[in-house]
Amino acid sequence: MRKTNQVNQLRTGVLLSYVNLGISCIIPFLYTPVMMHMLGQAEYGLYCLANSVISYLTLLSFGFGSTIIRYISKYRAEKNKEAVYRTFGFFLQLYTFLGILVFVVGLIISNNVEVIFRKGLTAAEIDKIHILIIIMAFNTALSFPMSVFSSIITSYERYVYRKLIDMISTIAAPIFNLVTLYMGFASIGMSIASTILQILMLPLNVIYCFRILKINPKFKRISYSLIKEMLGFSFYVFLGTIVDMLFWSTDKVILGMLASSTAIAVYNIGGTFNNMVISLSTSISGVLTPKITGMVATDVSKDQFTELFIRIGRLQYFVIALIISGFSVFGQSFIRLWAGSEYADAYWIAILTMFPLCIPLIENTGLSIVIAQNKHKFRSIVYLIIAVLNVVSTYLVVPYLGGIGAALCSCIAYLVGQGFIMNIYYYRVTRINIPLFWKNIGRMSIVPGSMLLLGIIINKKIILNRWSLFLISVVIYSLIYCIIMYKFVLNHYEKDIVRKPLLVIKRRFIH
């Protein structure tokens, strides 16, 4: 009975992930142009820069989020309730301390923004980013102890509740922001609105853990050897987090230091499409972490890991290939209609980072596997070296090529580190059958590759200068892609994922 419930939670969790993802795509589609228009390009870039600076403070979590999920899942599998409660209490205390540390560091950064950004920002922009960083630092500090509760919920595989909370936040955030913008409070008002929303959402996960899961933290000492083991596990997850920051936040910080707030705005729009693709990919693999941890604990065969790796990778690629090929064909028209011609370079920034990013995204089940196996040391070190080289090259290139130069450096870094080196590691060390995986992806790529080339040729002869024409073209492209892929590419398992929900809907309508 429990196993059936877990399977249902997993399936519903993936489904709700995509519902939330759909909402996450539709809302920014409507909300972002309004926000950019009301803020202006320069202040929008400034707001993005402040977010990038504050994102560095999340490094102070030291990668413990994955550690909480891993150890709570492990102790649950062992039916060791006492260990669960003690682990909960330990991390709740630790994250409260780290939250205080985050706010202190945020205050230090806010008092030194003039030294950091005096070449790229005006005096008025420096005054404003000083205030933004203080507000955002408080918001981030508040989120630290609360993140422990959400990790507990994930560890207990309560995906439905977790995703419903995510959906509420996704819908509420832009509503709060628009209200403050219409009241004339601009970027500072948006930061305050985010903090208010955070405070309102705080009790939900706390009450769920205490009342529904009936799990209470025990603030008792845990063994030094266990703390050492957890730190060893978390350290390389922490290095991975540093890498993500170096790739996704540092580019905007360097643009703020050496270029301008408008350059940051354009770069952020290009990165928005990458965030969408990342969300598409992780919405499936994100709910699999407890399952993979359980597979490692029960010592399943390498063939079972390969089967899972290929199965999830194919599902991810089906969706990601549609997004990337579609964006390649329609992206320029979309940006021109949606954001304006002044954001035209965002297309090339998105293309340069989106294509190589596809590789780690369709293989992120491999990351969950190596973390569960505690073999992520090599990955973290390689990524760190590549990321540092990316930062250095970006710093040298930005004065000459701006945002496109930053994106080009990231593109090369992703291809070398996350593409070439990690595929060798997955094959040699994790023993995943990588040649078989890429054989599957190669066969699936014929359809999106052909449609991309054909779409670009047709698009050159048709100017999509109206929303109606653009939307009709996108719908036709998507339908053709889905029909051909379903008919000639998807296997029986993948077809069932599409077919079974449609049959349920059909039966309900008939009856």
Image: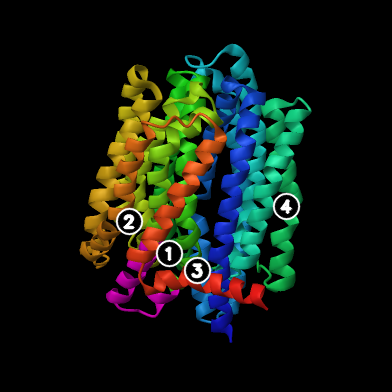
As measured in the structure, the alpha-carbon distance from the residue carrying label 2 to the one carrying label 1 is 14 Å
* Extent of the magenta region: 294-315
Q: Tell us which disc is closer to us: 2 or 4.
A: 4
- The colour scheme of the drawn protein is rainbow
Viewer-nearest residue: 175 or 474: 474
In the picture of the structure, the residue carrying the numbered disc 4 is 201
Give the residue type at disc 2.
Lys
Q: Give the overall secondary structure of the magenta segment.
A: helix
Amino acid of disc 4: Met
**Residue of label 2:** 377
**Residue ranking furthest to the right:** 183
Residue 42 as seen in the image, left or right of residue 208: left
**Label 2, label 3: how many angstroms apart (C-alpha)?**
18 Å
Toward the viewer: 204 or 84? Answer: 204
Mark number displayed over residue 128? none
Residue 135 in picture, x, y percent from top left: 67, 34
Mark nearer the viewer, 4 or 1: 4
